[in-house]
Image (cartoon, rainbow, N blue to C red):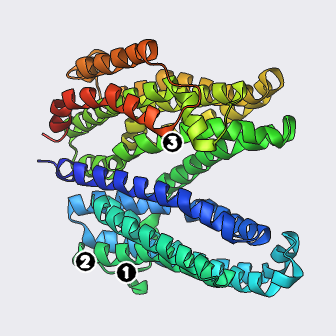
Amino acid sequence: MAEWKKRFWSNTISSYIQVVVRVALGLILFRQLFSHLNDAEFGFWSLLWSLFGYGVLLDFGFGFTAQKAVAEKTAQGDIQGLSRLLATILWTFIGLAVFMMVIFLLLRDPFLDAVNAPPELRAEFTRAYLIFFVGMALMFPLGVFPEMLRGLQRIDLANWFNTATTVLHFAGIVGALWADWRFSDILTISVITSLLPSVFAAIMAVRRLPGLSLSPRLFQLSSVKSQMSFSLAAFLITFSNLLMAKSDQLVLSLTVGVAAVAIYQAGYKMGEMLNLFSVQLQSALSPAAADLQARGDRAGLRDLLQRSSRLVFLLITPAYALTAVYLESLIQLLTGLAVVPRETYWVGQALALAVYSQQLTNGASKRILMMCGHEKSLLFLSVGDAFFNVTLSVLLVYQFEVLGVALGTLIPAVLIGWILVLPLALRALEFPVKDYLRFHFQGTKLPLVLCLSTLALLQWLAPMPAEGGFWPLAWRGALAGGPAMLLSLRVLRQMTR
């Protein structure tokens, strides 16, 4: 049995558990921070961690390269080559981390001036700034080790420890808030618990790669030259995706006004939650594809694509249908709004459809193509998607205001996904469209028809009450999705046969 099949369910289930724990505790923690910190402290906390989110760009694609290299070179038995490559990446990251630390130290006072740190909190914010950026500098090189675990197809190990440290992070911060600790001490807890998963990943990854050495003596720039093209493509694709994710709010702020962002954001959250649900199914695909590509197993790659994309189709379709039908009640539950503005409702519908379309066309295809030598084609498509997205959003916002920005995301997602991305994957793997589509409907027709029919009957016989609520949503979702999932068990078991 292929390695990805052995690990698929443990990787996927652990990913879902991690996400559920992180989202649930994150919502509670947000409320605790909001109520216990003053406005300046909460704003500074949010600003620091938002800056951390941009740190993904600082690895210049080499984190993804490390994942690919571990999968390929372990399949080929080339531990010496892997040692040279990983040692070069790690010590390059360490050098960059030291450079970043120097820059952050020099920018400390200008940064605190720029954010208008209150005079009475200046000393506390200075201490918090130093703690945060020292922690960020440590996290940067350690970030290579979770990628190594992914390359080994042991995402489950990283997920379980992430889940444990998420609970520890939550308990530590809430306890410190209730004990009325200093702001900088609370931030210290957050930084330390955020570092722990990477430390654990380092221990686990090195133990599972006997013979691996990360000595600085193995530093060899020539070892990464062959990976430069891939790393640059991964970096630019990540940058394009980040640009698309962050540009909508900026376009709205500069055209309609900052108040329009609140209208957009409530609908945006629904698409974000749907995407969070679906991407967990695909977390194991990249290393699996790299392993199969290294072995020259084209039949295995086709099998990986069709099985994973069918599973996404089977699970994301009911999730999207439930989101679309009960969107208004879901927004009410998330935001606490008694009445959902029409603009927010239609923004949510447009973005949920965009996510659904992207998951069917891009979800499995892009991850597999990226590891099979098609990164340049994906880069071209990603940059084109970002340009199309931003340009269309700017043009449509003047005609449709907030909804125009959402349509600027939806239209490129549908056109590029169905016309370019999916056909590219099928051509690359020499997969006939007819066979691909036929496989998707094997075992999925009855569960999906049952789910959609039940949902239609519920809308007719038991429509949602105007006030919404968790339990009315829960039992309707269980009734529409539960029996369909039972009928899907055979397909789920076939995923790893």
Front-most of 179 and 201?
A: 179
Comparing marks 3 and 1, which lies closer to the viewer? 3
**Which sits earlier in the primary sequence, circle 2 or circle 3?**
2
For the question of whether residue 19 can be seen, the reply is yes
Q: Which residue sits at x=58%, y=43%?
A: 334
Residue occupied by mark 3? 273
Asked whether the residues under the numbered discs 3 and 1 touch, taking CB atoms below 8 Å apart as contact, a structural biologist would say no
Residue occupied by mark 2? 207
Amino acid identity at mark 2: Arg
Q: Which residue sits at x=64%, y=67%?
A: 33
Amino acid identity at mark 1: Leu
In screen coordinates, is 333 left or right of 470? right
Front-most of 65 and 489?
A: 489
Q: Which residue sits at x=22%, y=45%?
A: 296
The secondary element bearing badge 3 is classed as helix
Residue 391 in the image: x percent, y percent? 74, 31
Q: CA distance from mark 1 to mark 2?
A: 13 Å
Which quarter of the picture shows residue 406?
top right
Q: Residues within 10 Å of mark 3 (few under 14, many from 20)?
A: some
